[in-house]
Amino acid sequence: MENVPSSCSSFAPEENGPETCDSSSAEDGLDDAFGDMAALPVEVGERRPTCLRCRRPQKVCLCPFLPPQPLEVSTCLYVVQHPAEESRVLRTVPLLAACLPQGKCNVIVGRRFSERKHPELAALCQDSRTLILYPGPESQNLEELVKYQEVGSVEHNIIIIDGTWSQAKNMFLKNSLFHLPKQVQLNRDLCSQYVIRTQPSNICLSTLECAAVALSILEQNDNIQEVLLRPLKALCSFQLEHGAQIHHSKEHLLKNGMYDKPMPKNKRKIKRMEKLVTDHNICPR
């Protein structure tokens, strides 16, 4: 992410530069300059019409691959989204939201959350029915957790962090609210089908894929996973047909000697990459 300088620092005078005018003259000059800029005609670029349901440009609308009616689920999904995800062109969360009833897929954007500033999120995290999908030594296998529950006996809330692997890790570690719900992970042997975006390992899943698997487990209905993944497969197929390349995971590239970027010098990063090659128990996010 770029650090954009503030407008005031852009016009800060050089510390030891020559004085060419007094402060009032300088201010008048800036006012004139901004006045001239404000008078310039503004060119408004034409935006492609967007489908209101799938949020894709109408020419590449994915609605034919969405369910005719939103899926009936008792689980409420909460996607905590890193702000950088909002500007990505090939996002999967809008497709996920289009498949579910209103109020069943809620998106919360931000990096830092506190009980004082986000009381509703704090209440959600303190609810005993809330789960957070994040792998780790404290995580419980989601399938084992609901194995003996009757369908609909508990209306779970599930939180999924949406961002790159490093962004999701950073958000989880730096937000104490996310340590309150029961932590769960997916232990199914899965391989991501989101092949147009690079994943750290072969079994790291996109946000939509995580939600699809988690909902199918909680609702005890494997058809949910199939329905939710249909628009993702269509998106990837369309992109590949129009010039996109298949993105193998870093794990695949390293194991097959195809990683063509310079190896990091940082020891922690080197160990992390070595773990991708040797560790077969990496869990999806």
Image: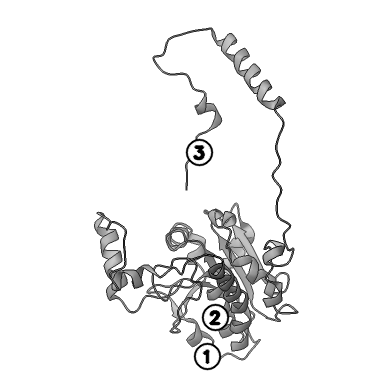
Disc 1, SS: loop
- Label pair 1/2, CB-CB below 8 angstroms: no
Q: Which residue is mark 3?
A: 4
Q: Which of the two labelled residues, at mark 3 and mark 1, occupies the earlier sequence position?
A: 3
From the viewer's perspective, is residue 79 above or below residue 39? below
Residue that appears at 49% across and 7% down: 20
As drawn, the label of residue 147 is: 1
Residue that appears at 52% across and 90% down: 147
Is residue 221 visible in the rendered image? The answer is: no
Q: Is 105 on the left or on the right of 133, as rendered? A: right
Residue type at the position of mark 3? Val
Q: Residues within 10 Å of mark 1 (few under 14, many from 20)?
A: few
From the viewer's perspective, is residue 201 above or below residue 148? above
- Label pair 3/1, CB-CB below 8 angstroms: no
Residue type at the position of mark 2? Val
Residue that appears at 47% across and 79% down: 186
**Percent x, y of residue 213:** 54, 80
Q: Which color scheme is applied? A: one colour
Disc 2, SS: helix
Q: Which residue is mark 2?
A: 213
Residue that appears at 73% across and 70% down: 102
Q: Which of the two labelled residues, at mark 2 and mark 3, occupies the earlier sequence position?
A: 3
- State the CA–CA distance, disc 1 to disc 2: 15 Å
Mark in the foreground, 3 or 1: 3
